[in-house]
Structures are given as structure tokens and as C-alpha cells.
Amino acid sequence: MTPGGRRSKSVAVIGCGGLGCNVLVHLAGAGIGKLYLCDFDVIAESNLDRQFLYKQADVGALKCERAAAFLHDYAPDVKTVTVDKKVTADTDLTFASSCAAVVLAVDNNEARRAAQAFCAGTGIPLVNGGVRSGFGTAYLYLPGESPCLSCAGLLETENTPERVNSATVGVIGALCAEITVAVLSGDRSAAGNLYIYDDFEIKKLKIRPERTCSCR
């Protein structure tokens, strides 16, 4: 797909923290036409070392709003829609109904389960990224076609508030954006492959559906 073709596409990014910042800037740079920025949190000073869309003067402001302001300057042709919501099991995600993909850049499994259920019901591709210290994963779930996040072991344990490596966040964010752009271009080959970044290597693990899971 040409950059011009991407102008007609919309992507929802849930989470505008360290991982989300990287995803957003790469998607905007790729020429995605509209980005939905979903995050309820405000910027803290401790975020600034890895959440590079924000600066000192932004502390206390909503992440989704300041991220949208950054993208307006960075890629003026990209339309942004801010969604000030915390994604839980009860959250209405219909704002993403017209999107060609949903990207999860969160650190909790309740949001992952909610987004997965929404995508399973709508058929929208779901890209999930996760980072813990110097370890990270990226995964593409295609509802009805590939194993879900649970099958990939991505919902087994809750993430801990462990300090993350800024460079690792950059690697996984760029990989999630690359997978998303590929899906929007019609390349779905990443589906069902768990990409694992560890010890300076990216490895690919083919996921098989759990026999007890109804995702396929």
C-alpha cells in the first residue's frame, strides 16, 4: 500500500505511555490517515525518560491530549481523535469500530481482555505489545484466523510495575507499528507468530491454538 492509500485507514491505539508513544509516532510517520488515542492517565515527571512525546511543561496534562498535540506538529495531515477512557471490562470501545486495526500498548491484562473481546466480536485485527525490563513481545491476533492472546500466553500473569528499558520500549513499539502497517497493506503473515525480544535478539515462536479455546 502506498502512503496515499494509508490516508484512508484508521487505527486505534490504546495506551499512550512509553510503548504507545513509539507506536503513534511510527504510525503517523507511515501516513495513517486517522489515529484514535485512548488513555485516561496524566503525564508524570517519571514518564519523561521514555515517553518522548511529552516534555516537562506537559506534566499533569492528559497523555492522549498532549500526544495528539505532538502528532499535529509532527504529521499535520494525520487526523487525531482523543479518547479519555480507562479500558476495563465495562468500557465501551465502539469508538474503534471503524478502525482497520487496534494496537494495545498497555500494561494490564484487564485492558487486553476487553480489547480482545471487542476485536473478536468485530473481526478487527489486534496488535499487542508488551515490555518488561529488557524483555518484550509483539503479537498479531486475527479473529477467527489465528490463536488469541490467551493461547499465546499473554494473559497468564498480570504485569508488575517493573521499571522498563526505554530502548526496549522503542524496539517493541516500532515492531508493533511495522506489523500494523503490514496488516493495513494486506500482509497478514505475522498473525499467530509471537515475536520475542530478549538478549539483543528477536525470535519468532509459532503459536498453536489451545484445544480448550474457542478463538478459532
Image: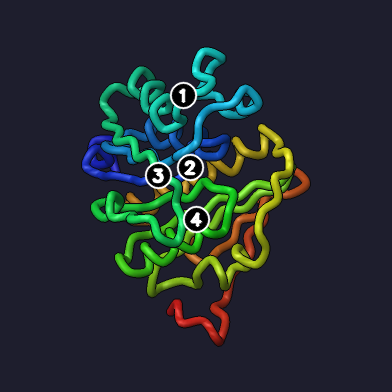
What's the amino acid at mark 4? Answer: Ala
Nearest to N terminus: mark 3 or mark 1: 1
Q: Position of residue 90 (x, y in %)?
A: 40, 60
Nearest to N terminus: mark 2 or mark 1: 2
Residue at the outermost bottom position: 211
**Residue 50 quadrant:** top right
What's the amino acid at mark 1? Answer: Ala
Q: Nearer the viewer, residue 156 or 179?
A: 156
What's the amino acid at mark 3? Answer: Lys
Nearest to N terminus: mark 2 or mark 4: 2
Relative to 170, 33 lies left or right: left
Graded by Cα atoms within 10 Å as few (under 14), some (14 to 19) or many (20 or more), the crowding at tag 3 reads: some
Residue bearing mark 4:
111
Residue bearing mark 3:
85
Q: Residue 72 got which mark?
A: none
Mark 2–mark 4 contact, CB under 8 Å? yes
User: Who's the residue at 67% across and 39% down the image?
Assistant: 168
User: Who's the residue at 62% across and 38% down the image?
Assistant: 169
Mark 2–mark 1 contact, CB under 8 Å? no
Graded by Cα atoms within 10 Å as few (under 14), some (14 to 19) or many (20 or more), the crowding at tag 4 reads: many
Q: Position of residue 130 (x, y in %)?
A: 60, 50
Numbered disc 4: secondary structure: helix
Q: Is residue 197 above or below residue 113?
A: above
Image label count? 4
Label 2, label 4: how many angstroms apart (C-alpha)? 10 Å
Mark 4–mark 1 contact, CB under 8 Å? no
Label 4, label 1: how many angstroms apart (C-alpha)? 22 Å
Nearest to N terminus: mark 4 or mark 1: 1
- Which marked residue is nearer to the observer: mark 4 or mark 1? 1
**Residue 196 visible to an observer of this rendering:** yes
Residue bearing mark 1:
61
Q: Position of residue 60 (x, y in %)?
A: 51, 23
